Amino acid sequence: PAGGQRTREQPGGVVKCGLLEAGKKGPRRDGSRARACSSMTRALPFPSADVVRRPVPVAAAPKMGKAAAGGAWCQEGVKPGMGRGIALLAPASSASPFLPTAAPALAAGNDGKKRAAWDLKGQLSDMRTKMSSYKDKVQRLDGENQQLKRQLQEQVVQNRELSSQVSTLSSALHTCQEQAHQRLHEVMELSDLKQQLEEQVTSHSRTIGQLEGTKRDLSSLLETREVKLKLAEEGLAQRECENKELRGQVAAQLQVMTQQEERLHHLEMERRRLHNLVQELKGNIRVFCRVRPLLAWEKERQKGLEHLHFPLQDNKALVLSKVEEVSPGTGAQLGDVKYDFSFDRVFSPACSQEQVFEEIALLVQSALDGYHVCIFAYGQTGSGKTYTMEGPDDMSPETMGMIPRAVQQVFQEARELEPKGWQYRFTANFLEIYNESLRDLLVGRPERGAELEIKRVSQSSEELHVPNLRYVPVDSEDEVLKLLRTAKANRSVAKTALNDRSSRSHSLFQLRIEGWNRSRDLHSVSVLSLVDLAGSERLDKSFSKGERLRETQAINTSLSTLGLVIMALSNKEPHIPYRNSKLTYLLQNSLGGNSKMLMFVNISPLEENLSESLNSLRFASKVNECVIGTAQANRK
């Protein structure tokens, strides 16, 4: 209506409407024709592109003036009847681009000619056309912006997945990880750039050309990243193929190793079987004879060893000879009488400790394989038993006896069996049997308590032990050698007519060997017994009296019992008199058929001891003829 005002309202925004004043046509005060003016304000963003028009009457419209500088329409008075104010509305969008800040000063027609100032409808039509074009551009740019945003979000997700995959690779992919981190950084920069673009779009500070340029830059950057990503994926695929091949090779190597371990186990078990077969062929009771050399002071009394003969072609034979008379006291000589003896091995005085141990090394190996092994030295006093078993006081690597050498071999072989799955635990004890009583040699005399007794471990087991005896766990040969020195200092010795330092007791060193092969579920237990027997003596030659006499009688009794036990085992008698002596009772498990036994018979080189040497050799010959059966390994 004339003199009225039209307004348009939109939810979430305010729109200014053009004002027209209705009036008569006529000349203005300045004499010029009145021109139709319209005021168009800047379109503000709306939530949607739809336009809601709601006419509202107004009291009066302001006058329209001349076009302002810059092409914007001025709001001034318009003559009545010129028309109504028109509200220009733009679609609302949070990401819409900038729109022109003002309409052109003069609207042009479709043919490009400038419209007359009074042609308001034509100008309005042109403005609507331009507004429609701007709306299309804004919608298109908004769609492109949304698509770019989705692409950026997808790229961020892809980059995160790539970072997760790259983090699981090995150090060889370190370069790829750095590239992935760099790309992630670039994505973050792009995110910041996107935020800046959104702020610029919100504030209408960016032009369409700038957005298009930014779009081209981003597209180029995305293409570059896609190429890099493709290269990285190809590299990852190649690494995965290489890893797959390596895993196959490792699996093949593991299979070969398993087969090799299985083969080594079978070879080890076959070695043990063959080793035991060789030992059985040699005999489960073997006798070695050793003749000690003459001492320096003995060489002055006796020139050479004419009564002892060692055949050059036979290292198992020993011949003793002596001159006998036809009848005692006549002086008529019958001639040389020879006594031939044969053993498993005979060692002349020139043989060293190392040569002697080489012959028993395989027997010591049997102890590690799970067989009870007993090695003892027998002979008259002063024949070199202690030297053979333990060595001299000032022991050196060349003069070490059988006990320290056997211990060294056991620990060395145990270390060599560790790669084959075997683990061992060793426990040592050292005692002496003096006058048929047990004494712990690892405990000093002031610390010794009550007399020790031999008992069974349990009613269902034949294994024997000595309660209150010191059993020492050992992990190396050095620990055992230290125990040997302690035991040697505590052993009972005394001076007799036959020996200045005669051993008056039987010393017994035992090493309990317990082995496991958990991967094969194998368990073995064995005892290596190394015994230095007291020297046998004849009372008419030793002139023992008092305490020495009782010692000699106890020694001879236990040695006689040892001979009876061995003979009973050889004859397979139903009763074996183990309990007649503490020595045989303690060695019960090492003397029976389920063990391997070796006896050193030590001979004095002195011709004056020929009769005692003959007795020792005859006893050893009987032992050598014994057969106690086949030994069985103590394995579970």
Image: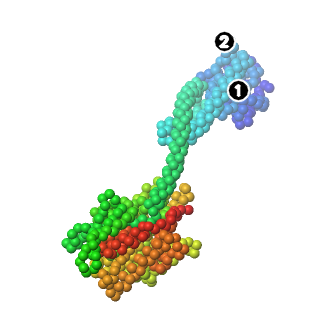
Question: For the residue labelled by badge 2, is the local secondary structure a helix, a strand or a loop?
Answer: loop
Quick one: quadrant of the N terminus?
top right
Q: In x, y percent, where is residue 514?
A: 49, 64
Of labels 2 and 1, earlier in sequence is 1
Q: Residue at x 33, y 75 (%)?
A: 612
Residue type pointed to by label 1: Leu
Is 574 drawn above or below residue 406 in the view shown? Answer: below
Q: Residue at x 45, y 79 (%)?
A: 581
Q: Which mark is residue 208?
A: none
Q: In x, y percent, where is residue 630?
A: 51, 63
Residue behind mark 1: 88
The residue at the far bottom in this view is 546
Residue behind mark 2: 113
Is 64 drawn above or below residue 600 in the view shown? Answer: above
Residue 141 figure quarter: top right
Is 313 drawn above or below residue 584 in the view shown? Answer: above
Between marks 2 and 1, how big is the CA–CA gap?
A: 23 Å
